Image: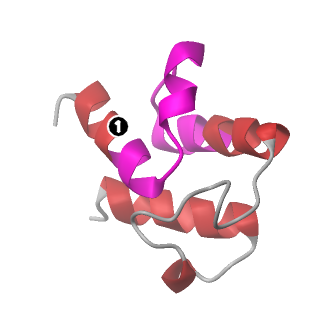
């Protein structure tokens, strides 16, 4: 079974059109992949849909790396 981190990195890689190996745990969606506001919104919507969790609008500003997203999911799921 894949970890949250692995799944997040795969989705991020697919979203930005890069190899999963090019997505580091601390890769920054804006600084490293050039994401703009619309791209970030779409990425977070995809992550929510595929990983079955919800993000409040107030939490989105803190989710800018795969690590932050994986930690958020672990906290959200209580794991």
- Residue that appears at 62% across and 83% down: 19
Q: Position of residue 40 (x, y in %)?
A: 71, 42
Q: Which residues are magenta?
A: 46-70
Check disc 1: other Cα within 10 Å, few if <14, some if 14-19, many if 20+: many
Q: In which quarter of the view is residue 24 placed?
A: bottom left
Quarter of the image with the N terminus in it? bottom left
Closest to the observer, 34 or 13: 34
Which corner quadrant of the image does residue 38 belong to?
A: top right
Q: Please give left or right for residue 75 compared with residue 7 in the image.
A: left
When the figure is inspected, residue 19 is found, relative to residue 66, above or below; the finding is below
Question: Magenta span has 61?
Answer: yes
Give percent across and percent down for residue 8.
47, 56
Residue located 71% across and 61% down the image:
15
- Camera-side residue: 26 or 17? 26
Residue 74: where, in percent of width, then height?
26, 38
Q: Which residue is mark 1?
A: 73
């Amino acid at each position: 079974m894949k970890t949250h981190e692995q799944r997040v990195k795969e989705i991020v890689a697919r979203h930005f059109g890069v190899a999963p190996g090019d997505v580091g745990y601390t890769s920054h969606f804006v600084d490293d992949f050039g994401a703009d506001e619309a791209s970030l919104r779409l990425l977070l919507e995809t992550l929510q849909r595929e990983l079955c969790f919800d993000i409040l609008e107030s939490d989105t500003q803190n989710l800018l790396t795969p690590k932050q997203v994986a930690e958020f999911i672990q906290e959200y799921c209580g794991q």
